[in-house]
Image: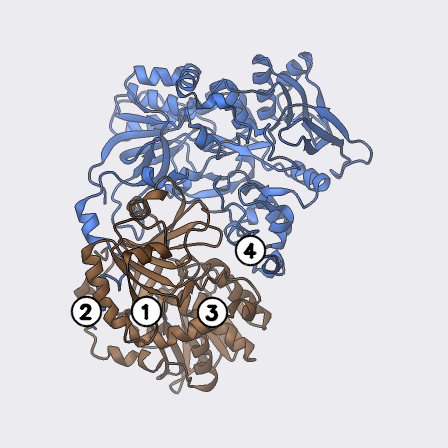
Chain colours: A brown, B blue
Amino acid sequence: MTTADVVIIGGGIIGLSSGYWLAKAGAKVVILEKGRVGWEASSRATGFLSLRGEQPLESPLAVEAERLWHTLDAELGSPTEWNAGGRLWAATTPEEWDELQETYKLFSETGIPFRLIEGKEARKIVPCLPENVIGGIHTTRSGHANPQRTTQAFAWAFVRHGGEILENTPAIGIVTKAGKVAGVKTPDLVIETATVVNCAGPQVGLVAEMVGVNVPVAAARLEAMVTVPLPPLFQVALVAHGLSLRQTRRGNIHFNGGPHEWIDVELTKSPAKPNTPIIRNMARRLAELFPSLANVQVLRSWGGVVEMTPDVNCIIERLDEPDGLIIATTSGHGFGMAPSVGLAISELALNGNTNLPIASLGLARFAKLDPMWKQRRNWTPGNYNT
Amino acid sequence: MVGTMEKRQVIVVGGGVAGCTAALEAARLGLNVALVDEHPQTLATMSLDTPYFYGSGLPNILSNRSLMAESVFGANELLMQCVEEGVDVYTSTCVWGSYRPGDNNSQIHSGQLGLADEKRSWMLEYDYLILAPGARDFVLSFANWQLPGVFGACGGSALLDRYKAFEGQNLFILGSGNWGLRMAKSALEAGVAVLGIVDVASQIQGDTQLATELQLAGVKFYLSHTIMRANGKLKVEGIRLVRINENLAPIADTEIDYSCDTICMAYSAVPNTELSASSNCKISFNAELGGWIPEVNQDMRTSENEVFVVGDGAFVTEAMVLDPTIATRAAKRAVEAIAKEQGLNVTSTTECVTTGSSLYPPTAWHQSLLNSGGLDVLVCQCEEVTRREVLDLTPPKYLLPFDRKPNGGLAGLSISGRTSQDLVKRLTRVGMGHCQGKRCRDQTALLLADNASGQLSAITPGSYRVPIRPLPLNVLWPEDESEQTRREWRTWIHAADGIPEV
């Protein structure tokens, strides 16, 4: 029989970050991962930290993440390629420009310095943008990093502080006694623990179901691509012309966007993540956005799976029923938020509460959710977000 | 997402002996068939060492497109026959992607290939796919292997026999198996001096008769030898060989420098599996037949019912290098299986061979090169990663020196991590570059195997990513993008949709 102070279900970046802060505080932590650590969305992400201007509900938690990002390399002891280069949303059509101005009203609620700028200024920030850029929203805050290196940096640091990772080990049951968490079952063993963190990404709902808790999420498959390395062109995390893109430290342009497919996931199996000919349309978008780079070669494409909550905000909560279970999903934008989300989870696990701003991110906000919400929105397997 | 798409009953990929035979057989049986071949390639594509290891010394004559077309078509009688007999032939056209129905892929209802020429790309649907992509060079590095004048046997043969654009005059060949011997024979026929064939083994590895023929023609064999380095500054000017003992270690004071202008790596070859892997075909490890190869049945049918693999793309054996009928019989057999399924009257059933032995993996070469060259030799030319940096998991060169501290090496990763070529690639960038891992993946797998149990079968090989040929954005893009696609495009779930109501 094995025991742990905390068992974390899910070895993505949220599980690894939570595990890191817990192990650093001296807790005995086991991370259960059905496949391999950091192998799903965590290492396939675009690599943005978003300050969530468009969703002020979780903006304060993102600001906490930003604070931690600035010293994360030193904290973890490995390079994450953090680039505090800010962020730019650029509009290339009048419709997009109208939308951005509308969105800006939400941005300005956050207290974070977002500015509406003209096309000319946008092109100073990203010189390869075309003449037809009308304007944008810019902030010098936030940034981006290398998802593969960051995820592994958390894994290394977690293990260095005595954490244990069990790969190819799905959680197949949560044991409760008298309304309290008592352990987690894997195919081979039961780990006794009073505290369980469910941060199983797209599988978060399936894991919660094992103890009768409803966590409303829908899983989606997305596609991403990179070009060959180029000389330094821009520093910001850029959202424009239907793409999210950044230039990596190495120089590749990493981009994604476009139709994504709602899918079903299984508790113990890694979901299929095929690419489709949609990558051709993505390539076209990038060439249209950066006409001077239309001859640049594409090197790779890949797919990834993320989960979305009904309001697209994170869910982070320590439940009373069963006592000792913490639920965490970051709704497809967990990479950038991982440092503060993990810290919040570690405090919830150790102290039962946290001063980090998660009070409005509980499950209660979905109390009146229509049980058929996915069907109503066509967020059901086989449908696209079009 | 694409407006219109053409369809063929059968698409054959690869215009070598196996592919042309399959296309001809299919056409003769009345099937509607297209054959796609990437040759003659552009100099720009060849300079990415795709699909073969051509090396950095490609001659300028390759940019003369009409001359190259004349050479390549002139050297391929079977391909000319395909054109004459009604096969829809696409040359200078690469297949960059293969999409098949499968889980989490509701938009793909039938198999389709992504094709591209120099100017544009398009999709082509099929009922049956016959892959005949051939083999590629298994390369192992040594000091100065990035110099012009170093190439692989597949690349060298292509330049000699097909492109007639081989500029070397004095050649050393590394490997006395049939790939090396065949290369030597081609070179002699083209008037190139073959100064020596080197092997770490104490005996010639390839066909005895062919080896005798070469010896009679004056070719010297340097057995129980390995290469220490290519000599030269701007191009190959010579080769340094050394005798090795029974432990594959160099024997002191036996180094000798020879002059030469070209060095051909013919340690072994492996099937090109990018397309079978991208087509969802089950790939498994088989050391006798060339490593990670698609599983096929007696009809050369893969785990995907509509996909067949024939020729060197299915597996490689020493016998196949000299006997093209092994590939042609496999091609015929595959077409017969398709024809029968289509209700055509097929009288015969061709017997084909699916067994044999190969020189894969060339572990003795690998050990001797480690012993003679040490760890500070480049494995990955694109991203400049050395053997030591692979084993130490050193962060890549573009980071600042204080960020490049090794982090516990491979031992600091989990068991599944340290045997994963993809994870090691992510952390060191070995295999991340523009050759898409063709030059480094085999050596990296051997290094990871040395570090693990010594068994290559314990390694999780690197995945293949579409496009399997690097393509410019404005070639990969669809010319026929639909209005609907443009209208319904979303950046991300929250951006254009606003916050959904709960």
Residue receiving disc 2: A372
Q: Does B487 appear above or below B26?
A: below
Q: Residue furthest front?
A: A120
- Do pointers 1 and 2 mark residues of a single chain? yes
Q: Nearer the viewer, residue B424 or A124?
A: A124
The secondary element bearing badge 4 is classed as: loop
Q: Nearer the viewer, residue A187 or B64?
A: B64
Q: Position of residue B248 (x, y in %)?
A: 73, 38
- Which quarter of the image is occupied by the C terminus of chain B? bottom left
Distance between mark 4 and mark 1 Cα atoms = 30 Å
The secondary element bearing badge 2 is classed as: loop
Q: Position of residue A354 (x, y in %)?
A: 42, 84
Mark 1 or 2, nearer chain start: 1
> Residue shown at 35%/84% (left/top)?
A321
Mark 3 or 1, nearer chain start: 3
- Do pointers 3 and 2 mark residues of a single chain? yes
Distance between mark 2 and mark 4 Cα atoms = 49 Å
Q: Position of residue B229 (x, y in %)?
A: 69, 34
Residue receiving disc 3: A69
Residue receiving disc 4: B399
- Asked if one can make out residue A261 in the rendered structure from this viewpoint, the answer is no
Distance between mark 4 and mark 3 Cα atoms = 18 Å
Q: Chain of mark 2?
A: A
Q: Chain of mark 4?
A: B
Residue receiving disc 1: A114
Residue contact at pointers 2 and 4, CB within 8 angstroms:
no
Given the image, on which type of amino acid does mark 4 rest?
A: Leu
Q: Does A311 appear above or below B108?
A: below
Q: Nearer the viewer, residue A187 or B470?
A: B470
Nearest to viewer (mark 4 / mark 1): 1
Nearest to viewer (mark 1 / mark 2): 1
Q: Quadrant of residue B296?
A: top left
